[in-house]
């Protein structure tokens, strides 16, 4: 028995959020002994801090990584399909923009809390996977491979030795900080000037949704934006994206009056549906949004980063969780391909993922710049319809960028490069078309031509 | 007396390198009480670690900031004009590329050590400027404005309260680290895959320079590069830029034999001039090159960053020191414009400088990519000659990028944007010219045209 323990490869995963728990499940399935440390209490039995979640949208990549573990039956009942965007103008007009080319191409609203609980439930089935709650990783000594684990109730710190560490402890990862102290480590954290605030639209008295259910609702207002995603209980989780500073900003919305005036003025159709608006606004924290880039993601085959710890992105492409789940799938593939040789596997994983999550960071930031404004533009809509029409005509030879990102597993970097090529062709085709139309018009109008 | 002390604005400058000492001089001239802390012993009387310096090239911006303080008479005798690049091919052929359009447009080689000593000498003239050597800033508490100063001899740390702190403590600044702990701080450190090594060409027995004196000598070799800058004593300080890893890299040059073979093969004309090559190579440390970007550069009008602490850049445009000196000049201007209101002055300074040092970081990185290869290309040379000819023809309406960066004080960002516009015009003009030549040729050759 003790021999077996010595031989069994063991992994320590820091962070039982979405990425950490899924990674632990994949590692447990491979037969590894897995220990998972989480700073919060067990969220299935304790209430945990709420009010700072942007609801999540599961798309192809995330679903694929869950399904590959056989989790489809427990996840699907938690989801609500969203077939497209429902744009709310200031005048209350609604415009529908489908996400996919076919009704099957939808994304799925899911609550972070319910998804995380489902993953923890799944983890409980594996006898070789052990979870310690209220145990926060506060440090890692790379030469001795000793983790410092703080008991969050007593504030005492104990030393735990680890063979292989998976850092899934989020954007401000303590595991990454240990890597950051190594020589010539590349690191960047970049914050947006916008913050976000969670708000809510409760269910109607009969339990129905107060807005049409199967859509991601958006109120784009140039400098700021409100979105709403449906929950299973009939409510919507809303997120307001707003600048920290400026004329209309979190800094200027300091009292009840200012908050009411702001919402009545900019979101008149939805404000009456939010009875707890002011309390929510004043009570819920303002979240910041950061892009984290770092390299390398691994250390000597002994430490590896996944999820936000490796590549936090801003939420405007709805791909943060999906990319993190894809990390878990790829890491599992790499470990199996290299027969558990973690040095080779981690290098392979890093090589595959870094370029793609860098591309995703760019995509998400570009959408931050464009989404508040562009989705409301008629040109954007027309171009989008044209792309979908071309895609229906040409099949997989022409895929809109959103389709590649959300409904395929084409690597992000490849999707981005391919979309840029398609854009150039489409621009050239449209310019040629415009020229031909102009020539035809001139021919027809010119007296001498007749 | 004690009343006067309370009223006199006081500045604490961390770091008596080039930027910190010049900033302290500017602040002292304004009548402030200035305290300067430096981790090293006084380099005028103690020997300090050597062998990791890339020789410096003073250009317009740096000279201007020195001259504005009346330092011209002490600085000029320390400099050697470099009129252009002298390119050494593998075959030993020399090609001269002038830096400027006129002989007056030159840059100046200067030793970091001698320049720093001259600045410290100048500082000794100000009774309101006090320097503490062997005193390293290891921390700053922003709420209490308490600095932690470590005595580097005894390793004891004492607390010193400060009214206003100027962080001039380099790329790995402890002052910046205090700012980095504030909310939503943007920070990025990016290392190059190349490192550098200081080497030397001693003076000839008669004291003359072993290579032509008034040039910056370059041996561009695609993946690596050697440069040499003249010193007053007849020697040259050389810097080898080479990848850390790979077939020909610092990792592969581990023994005497490998070092000799590498130099004999790639730099045959200069290796005989370097008698201490192997010892220098093995003894001098390999330096890393990093770009640091951060924001904000100031905190509540009480802390401000200058030089590498705010914007370390890679050395390939020869502008790191010049930009840091320009920081000192602009900071002085801002403090005077706002009558010593540090809150307004630091915001003004940051606003003026951040966009320009970001542009410089890009310029320096682009030159890193291009310099090892492009300076040896005949196309590059031809284009460069054309630009200089145009500039002579059009005067200040057409200035080559290198001219704007090195011989004017046009802000870096403006210089970069203007060069991009000029490039587009030049490309269009060349394409038109090519087309006209082609048409003329066709006309002349076509039998029917005659």
Image: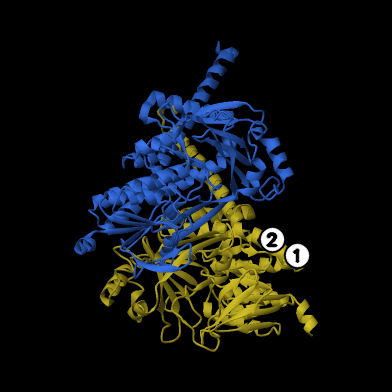
Chain colours: A blue, B yellow
* The quarter of the displayed image where residue A300 is located: bottom left
| Chain of residue at mark 1 | B
Q: Residue at x 63, y 42 (%)?
A: A223
CA neighbours of label 2 inside 10 A, class few (<14), some (14 to 19), many (20+): some
Q: CA distance from mark 1 to mark 2?
A: 10 Å
Instruction: Pick out the residue farthest to the front.
Output: A45
| Marks 1 & 2 on one chain | yes
Up/down of A433 relative to B265, above or below: above
- Along the horizontal axis of the image, is B242 left or right of B160? left
Up/down of B32 relative to A78, above or below: below
Q: Position of residue B182 (x, y in %)?
A: 59, 62
Q: Residue at x 56, y 17 (%)?
A: A441
Up/down of B444 relative to B417, above or below: above
User: Do tag 1 and tag 2 residues touch (Cβ < 8 Å)?
Assistant: yes
Residue under pointer 1: B337
Depth check: give the residue in front, A97 or B112.
A97
Q: Which mark is residue B348?
A: 2
CA neighbours of label 1 inside 10 A, class few (<14), some (14 to 19), many (20+): few
Disc 1 element = helix
């Amino acid at each position: 028995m003790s021999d077996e323990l010595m031989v069994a490869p063991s992994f320590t995963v820091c962070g039982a959020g979405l990425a950490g728990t899924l990674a632990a499940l994949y590692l447990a399935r491979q037969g590894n002994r897995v220990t998972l440390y989480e700073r919060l209490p067990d969220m299935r039995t304790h209430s945990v801090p709420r009010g700072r979640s942007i609801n999540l949208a599961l798309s192809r990549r995330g679903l694929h990584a869950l399904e590959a573990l056989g989790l489809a039956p427990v996840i699907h009942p938690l989801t609500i399909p969203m077939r497209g965007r429902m744009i709310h103008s200031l005048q209350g007009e609604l415009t529908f923009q489908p996400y996919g080319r076919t009704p099957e191409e939808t994304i799925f609203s899911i609550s972070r809390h319910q998804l995380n609980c489902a993953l923890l439930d799944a983890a409980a089935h594996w006898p070789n996977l052990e979870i310690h709650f209220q145990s926060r990783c506060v440090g890692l000594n790379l030469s001795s491979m000793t983790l410092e684990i703080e008991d969050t109730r007593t504030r005492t710190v104990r030393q735990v030795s680890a063979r292989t560490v998976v850092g899934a402890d989020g954007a401000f990862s303590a595991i990454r900080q240990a890597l950051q102290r190594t020589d010539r480590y590349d690191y960047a954290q970049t914050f947006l000037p916008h913050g976000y605030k969670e708000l809510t639209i409760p269910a109607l008295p009969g339990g129905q949704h107060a807005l049409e259910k199967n859509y991601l609702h958006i109120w784009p207002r140039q400098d700021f934006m409100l979105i709403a995603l449906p929950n299973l209980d009939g409510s919507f989780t809303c997120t307001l994206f707003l600048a920290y500073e400026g004329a209309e900003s979190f800094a200027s919305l300091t009292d009840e009056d200012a908050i009411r005036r702001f919402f009545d003025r900019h979101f008149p159709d939805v404000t009456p549906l939010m009875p707890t608006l002011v309390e929510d606004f004043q009570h819920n924290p303002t979240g910041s949004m950061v892009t984290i880039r770092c390299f390398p993601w691994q250390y000597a085959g002994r430490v590896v980063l996944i999820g936000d710890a490796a590549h936090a992105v801003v939420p405007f492409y709805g791909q943060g969780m999906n990319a993190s789940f894809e990390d878990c799938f790829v890491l599992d593939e790499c470990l199996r391909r290299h027969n558990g040789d973690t040095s080779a596997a981690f290098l392979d994983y890093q090589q595959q993922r870094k370029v793609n999550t860098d591309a995703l960071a760019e995509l998400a930031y570009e959408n931050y710049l464009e989404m508040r404004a562009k989705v409301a533009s008629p040109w954007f809509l027309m171009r989008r319809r044209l792309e979908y029409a071309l895609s229906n005509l040409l099949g997989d030879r022409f895929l809109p960028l959103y389709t590649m990102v959300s409904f395929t597993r084409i690597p992000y970097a490849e999707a981005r490069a391919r979309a840029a090529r398609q854009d150039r062709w489409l621009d050239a085709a449209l310019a040629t078309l415009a020229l031909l139309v102009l020539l035809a018009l001139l021919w027809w109008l010119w007296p001498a031509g007749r």
